[in-house]
């Protein structure tokens, strides 16, 4: 087979979707966005760099496509009826699930704006509609949307390098034990609170911490909605 035929065959085996999937696989690992290059993706996909340039003109275009793909995949199952508090919880949980499954999304959204219709429909229009359908005034729904996505982004970015928070089962328990042991072993004269509170500090990047913060947000937002309703 000639080089030209090999190149043609390679191109037939890949697509924009395959390139984006490969890029997410690389970036969601500990390697991060810096590891996403046209050359590394070409190697991973078993093709030439020029083949990839036939689909994307630059790394920035690949990153944009990654962000759009992830945000368009948000899972927010429909319900017939729910309270504002239930809607706020559902949205917060959907955001954090998406971001913890794809740790690179927190890096992506800190450097670019998603513009595809698919991502805007799933991650913005449908989410806002969910909040409005639950009885939250439209302008307040926008503020709630911003607060929830920013909270989820911050938590996901904090958790990503702290694997003792994300891991479950025996592996997670062991990672938390090791981290707690590290903090507890610091000089008590210099770090009295860190040493004393090591069992609590080790829980900061866990789902339990996110749920605690989410309930605080929901409680505050519910009071604000009640006050707003009384004024209108």
Image (cartoon, rainbow, N blue to C red):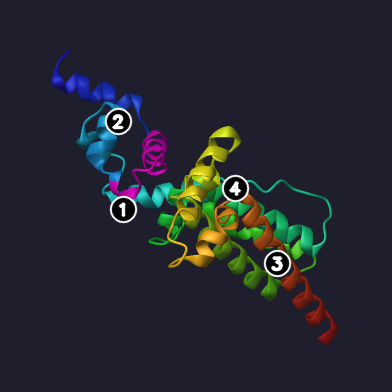
Locate residue 42, reporting x and y percent: 26, 33
List the single residue furthest toward the top: 1
Classed neighbour count for the residue bearing mark 1: other residues with Cα under 10 Å, few (<14), some (14–19), many (≥20): few
Residue 97 numbered tag: 4
Q: Is residue 201 left or right of residue 112?
A: right
Classed neighbour count for the residue bearing mark 4: other residues with Cα under 10 Å, few (<14), some (14–19), many (≥20): some
List the single residue furthest toward the bottom: 231
**Mark 2 sits on what residue?**
44
Q: Is residue 63 magenta?
A: no
State which region is magenta. 16-34
**Mark 1 sits on what residue?**
60
What residue is rendered at 50% in x and 52% in y? 159
**Mark 3 sits on what residue?**
216
| Quarter of the image that includes the C terminus | bottom right
Q: Quadrant of residue 210?
A: bottom right
Classed neighbour count for the residue bearing mark 3: other residues with Cα under 10 Å, few (<14), some (14–19), many (≥20): few
Marks 2/1: CA–CA distance? 18 Å
**Mark in front: 2 vs 1:** 2
What residue is rendered at 29% in x and 36% in y? 41
């Amino acid at each position: 087979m000639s080089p030209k035929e090999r190149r043609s065959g390679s191109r037939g085996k890949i697509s924009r979707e395959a390139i984006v999937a490969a890029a997410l696989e690389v970036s969601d690992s500990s390697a991060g966005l810096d590891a996403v290059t046209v050359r590394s993706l070409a190697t991973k996909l078993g093709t030439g760099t020029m083949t990839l340039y036939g689909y994307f003109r630059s790394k920035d275009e690949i990153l944009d496509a990654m962000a759009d793909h992830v945000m368009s995949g948000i899972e927010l199952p429909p319900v017939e009826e729910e309270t504002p508090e239930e809607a706020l919880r559902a949205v917060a949980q959907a955001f954090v699930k998406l971001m913890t499954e794809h740790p690179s999304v927190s890096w992506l959204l800190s450097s670019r704006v998603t513009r595809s219709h698919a991502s805007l429909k799933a991650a913005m229009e449908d989410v806002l509609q969910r909040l409005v359908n639950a009885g939250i005034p439209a302008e307040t729904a926008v503020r709630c949307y911003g607060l929830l996505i920013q909270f989820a982004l911050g938590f996901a970015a904090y958790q990503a390098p702290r694997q003792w928070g994300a891991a479950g089962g025996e592996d997670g328990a062991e990672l938390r034990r090791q981290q707690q042991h590290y903090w507890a072993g610091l000089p008590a004269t210099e770090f009295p609170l860190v040493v004393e509170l090591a069992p609590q500090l080790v829980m900061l990047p866990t789902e339990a911490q996110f749920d605690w913060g989410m309930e605080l947000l929901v409680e505050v937002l519910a009071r604000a909605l009640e006050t707003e309703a009384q004024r209108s």
